Every structure is written in C-alpha cells, then in structure tokens.
Image: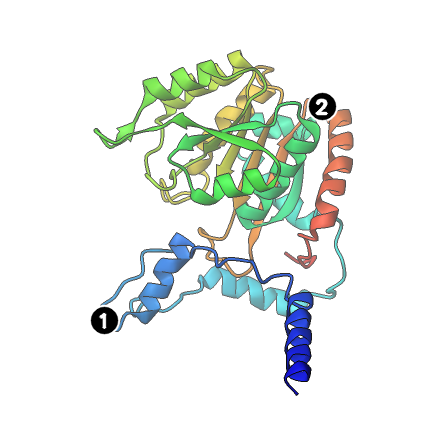
C-alpha cells in the first residue's frame, strides 16, 4: 500500500512538472505610472477629486466630455458611411488627403512639398502607433539605428523605439535649476552626434516639462541638424494646446518644411495625433509623414511603408474618416 501511494505521488509530481504552464515564470510587470494614477483616482472617495493624470476633456462634474464637432461628425458618418470593408494599407485615402492639407497646406513651403509629391502619409493608431511604424521603418531602411531623445521625455518614447529594434540615448533638454530650456547643453549634445543620427523632437508642449524652445531657438536647433546631417523625427501630440490655435502650433513644422523645400534638409519624419486635441483617445486617430527627396523616391518609400505596416494590422479605419 505504501509503495502504491509512493508511485501515485511520484506520478502526480512528474505530471505537474511536465504540464506546468509555459507562463509560470512570467513576473508581474510594474504598473504604468500614468495609468496607475487613474487607478488611484478611481479608488479615491474624495468628492472633490480631480484627475490630472491623463489629458482628456472633462465637464464641470469631472465626467468625460465629447467635443460637439466630434458628435456632429459622427452624425454625418452615421448617415453617409457605406462600408466597413478594408481600406488601403496606408489608410483611408480621404483621411490622408485631408491630413496633408491640414499639416502641409497652410504654408507655401509645405504646399511646395505637396506639389513636388515629397510627402508620404499613412494613417496611424494615434501618435503611439505612428511612432512605432516610424521606428520600424527607420530600423529597416536607415543605416543608423541610434535615436537621441530629450532628457526627460515621455517614458513611452523609449519603449516604442527600443521595441522597434533601435537604441536610445538622451540629449540635454531641461535645466532643473531654472525650470527652462538648457539651450547650450542641447546644442552641444546635438553637435556631438554622428551624421545620420536620429533625433526625436517634441513639436510643441514638451512632455513632461511643458517647456518648448522659442522660434529663434528652433532656428539654432535646425541649423545644427542640417549641418550635422541628422535625421529629425517630430512628435506632435498636443497640436493647438500651446497657442490655442492648431495652425499656429504648426510653426515648427513650417520651419522644417521650409528647410526641406529650400534644399537644406532632404528628409524628416512626423508622428501626429488627434487623441488629445480632438478628445479621440478611444478612436486612436493619428498619422505619420515621411518627407522624401522627390516624387520617384516617394513611390518607393510608400511601397516599403506598406510592407512595414502590413504585419502590424494597425490600420482598419473606415473610409469615411
């Protein structure tokens, strides 16, 4: 009897080891710092609480608020939308046409880039998805895999870029002693970068400091980028929140468009989001742009961009967007 019990116990132990879950050694990840604040907010019983963790619109009662313009657009779609079928890999042609007009149609240099067919645009899953595609495209086709990001920057920037197979380093940005831009340190670090190095820049409303370069400081930054032949990536998540006017907040993009249109800069990239300014967090609406050297190059870049996007299945927006 004892021997039988021993055999049974041994068999169960062996079976337990054999059929142990392949995920048994997965450790619990630390909570996301920003979303973790929302969890704490939801658990707080204080009736006067205010959630400052996520930049989303709220009414005077602290409830989510949908922009009237968004509701109007949804009403139009409910009456005019005719299909839920696939759109092209780079997204809705209508959306891409309109986003080009918004981003590049409001200044002469951007208009020239459009006329010369130098802007390749794709729909993206907000800024995060757009930046992920940009990272993958850079890793695949650029001979430099290192990205300089400001110190500090949005924490997810580093995660997105490194998941794309790129390496990241920081460049000086914020002066904690004066709560202002460390212009000298920033320019010095960019000057040290090797040619071809990718530089991530916040187009406006730097996250998390809120400190942006002034226009004349942007001129100095752009001069270093062109002289050192760096590859700039603009991330624009807060368009309209700096000045209150979404077109005025394109001033930095206009400078890069001018540099490209006048031959000082061959290429730059842009990741853009409507999650915050239009309150479309749930819809994840955004875009990415790749500025090429000419129309023939744009054809080739678009074809490869489609190959990069296809495995992600990131684009399933409706045609009516």
Q: In which quarter of the image is residue 81?
A: bottom right
Of 212 and 69, nearer the camera is 212
Q: Say if residue 276 shows up in the picture.
A: yes
Q: Say if residue 105 shows up in the picture.
A: no
Q: Distance between the residues labelled 2 and 1?
A: 58 Å
User: Tag on residue 147?
Assistant: none
The residue that label 1 is drawn on is: 46
Residue that lies at the very extreme toward the bottom in this rendered image: 1
Q: In which quarter of the image is residue 170?
A: top left
Pinpoint residue 236: horizontal percent, then vertical percent. 48, 40
- In the picture, measured across the screen, residue 209 lies left or right of residue 67, that is left
Q: Quadrant of the N terminus?
A: bottom right
The residue drawn where x is 45% and y is 14% is 191
Pinpoint residue 321: horizontal percent, then vertical percent. 63, 56
Secondary structure of residue under mark 2 = loop
Q: Are marks 2 and 1 in contact (CB under 8 Å)?
A: no
The residue drawn where x is 75% and y is 42% is 306
Image: 70 above or below 296: below
Image: 292 above or below 26: above
- In the picture, measured across the screen, residue 127 lies left or right of residue 80, that is left
The residue that label 2 is drawn on is: 294
Pinpoint residue 287: horizontal percent, then vertical percent. 59, 44
Question: How many circles with numbers are drawn on the protein?
Answer: 2
Residue that lies at the very extreme toward the top in this rendered image: 227
Of 106 and 297, nearer the camera is 297
- In the picture, measured across the screen, residue 122 lies left or right of residue 205, that is right
Pinpoint residue 216: horizontal percent, then vertical percent. 37, 20
Image: 125 above or below 114: below
């Amino acid at each position: 009897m004892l021997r039988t019990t021993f055999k049974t116990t041994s068999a169960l132990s062996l079976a337990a080891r054999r059929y142990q879950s392949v995920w048994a050694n997965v450790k619990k990840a630390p909570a996301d710092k920003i979303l973790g604040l929302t969890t704490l907010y939801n658990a707080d019983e204080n009736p006067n609480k205010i959630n400052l963790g996520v930049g989303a619109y709220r009414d005077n009662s602290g409830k989510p608020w949908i922009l009237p313009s968004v509701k109007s657009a949804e009403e139009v779609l409910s009456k005019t939308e005719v299909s839920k079928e696939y759109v092209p890999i780079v997204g809705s042609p209508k959306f891409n046409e309109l986003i080009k007009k918004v981003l590049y149609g409001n200044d002469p240099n951007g208009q020239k880039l459009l006329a010369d067919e130098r802007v390749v645009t794709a729909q993206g899953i907000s800024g995060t998805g757009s930046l992920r595609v940009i990272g993958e495209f850079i890793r695949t086709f650029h001979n430099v895999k290192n990205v300089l990001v400001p110190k500090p920057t949005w924490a997810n920037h580093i995660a997105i870029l490194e998941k794309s197979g790129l390496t990241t380093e920081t460049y000086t940005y914020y002066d904690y002693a004066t709560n202002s831009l460390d212009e000298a340190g920033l320019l010095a670090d960019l000057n040290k970068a090797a040619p071809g190095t990718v530089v991530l820049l916040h187009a406006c409303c730097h996250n998390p400091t809120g400190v942006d370069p002034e226009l004349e400081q942007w001129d100095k930054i752009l001069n270093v980028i062109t002289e050192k032949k760096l590859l700039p990536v603009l991330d624009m998540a807060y368009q309209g929140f700096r000045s209150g006017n979404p077109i005025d907040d394109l001033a930095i993009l206009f400078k890069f468009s001018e540099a490209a249109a006048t031959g000082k800069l061959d290429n730059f990239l842009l990741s853009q989001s409507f999650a915050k300014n239009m309150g479309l967090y749930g819809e994840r609406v955004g875009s990415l742009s790749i500025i090429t050297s000419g129309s023939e190059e744009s054809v080739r870049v678009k074809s490869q961009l489609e190959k990069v996007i296809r495995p992600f299945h990131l684009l399933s927006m409706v045609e009516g967007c």
